[in-house]
Image: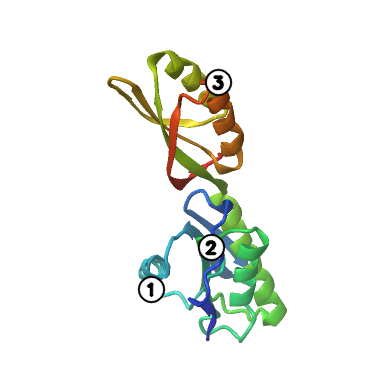
Amino acid sequence: MNNFLNIGGDQPPPPSEYITLERESEIEYVEKKSVFIGRAKRVCSVEEAAEYLESVKKKNPDARHHVYAYQINRGAAERMSDDGEPQGTSGPYVLDVIKKKGFTDAIIVVTRYFGGILLGASGLTRAYSTAANRAAEAAGIVRYVEYSVFISILSYNDYQKVEYLVKTYGAVIDDVVYEENVSLTFAVKTSEKDELLQRIIDMTAARALISECGTRFGSEN
């Protein structure tokens, strides 16, 4: 059974930060002779999630079930599947792990090899939840925050002071071009940009020419 929760539709507003999986993981969990292989991976599109699911199926072609769930772009696309297990006993609980941990752009697949002993509905739910949770924990957490990117045109005298200042804010220096003046490209956390820009203006007595040229996300780990 496949459950489509939300595919497409209204897009959520752009985030200032988000949490996702740090790395791909694989764990194994045994419950009453049934083997559950939990895998977690960061994916950035529905297509990438589908490709990963197919790769898991190819690794374990003789497995009885490949239960999965994913969430893309903070719920703009979600999908889960019980993949032949009794309805509602597995897929929703794998998705619940993703949601409770606050992940986005993540897929968890739990592959089951039946061990000959029936687990019952509650046993299945517990086993799939455990395998999904362990896979998520093994993958680790990484937090991304929004950075705003700026280009500042500075005199040589102002450049050294401004460069030191932006570094104290943990900003990333992307590029420095030395010509008649100095062109400094840097990225600072969006939450701190207003304060930093005001300090640059004050420090240079408004001589600095500053233009914003976009945003990007950077890892805080």
Question: Is there a contact, CB below 8 Å, between mark 1 and mark 2?
Answer: no
Mark nearest the camera among 2 and 3 is: 3
Which amino acid, by three-letter code, is at mark 1? Pro
Residue 38 got which mark?
A: 2
Residue that badge 3 annotates: 203
Q: Position of residue 114 (x, y in %)?
A: 54, 76
Q: Residues within 10 Å of mark 2 (few under 14, many from 20)?
A: many
Q: Earlier in the sequence, mark 3 or mark 1?
A: 1
Q: Earlier in the sequence, mark 1 or mark 2?
A: 2
Q: Position of residue 115 (x, y in %)?
A: 56, 75
Q: Which residue is mark 1?
A: 61
Q: Which badge, 2 or 3, is on the more N-terminal residue?
A: 2
Tell me the CA gap for discs 2 and 3: 54 Å
Amino acid type at image mark 3: Met
Q: Residues within 10 Å of mark 1 (few under 14, many from 20)?
A: few
Give coordinates of residue 78: x percent, y percent. 53, 73
Query: Which quadrant is home to the C terminus?
Result: top right
**Mark 2: which amino acid?**
Gly
The CA distance from mark 3 to mark 1 is 64 Å
Residue that sits furthest to the top in the current view: 157
Q: Residue furthest left?
A: 179
- Secondary element under disc 2, as helix, strand or loop, is strand
- The residue closer to the viewer here, 36 or 210, is 210
Say left or right for 102 vs 109: right
Q: Nearer the viewer, residue 73 or 167?
A: 167
In space, the residues marked 1 and 2 are separated at their CA atoms by 15 Å
In this picture, is 23 found above or below 62?
above
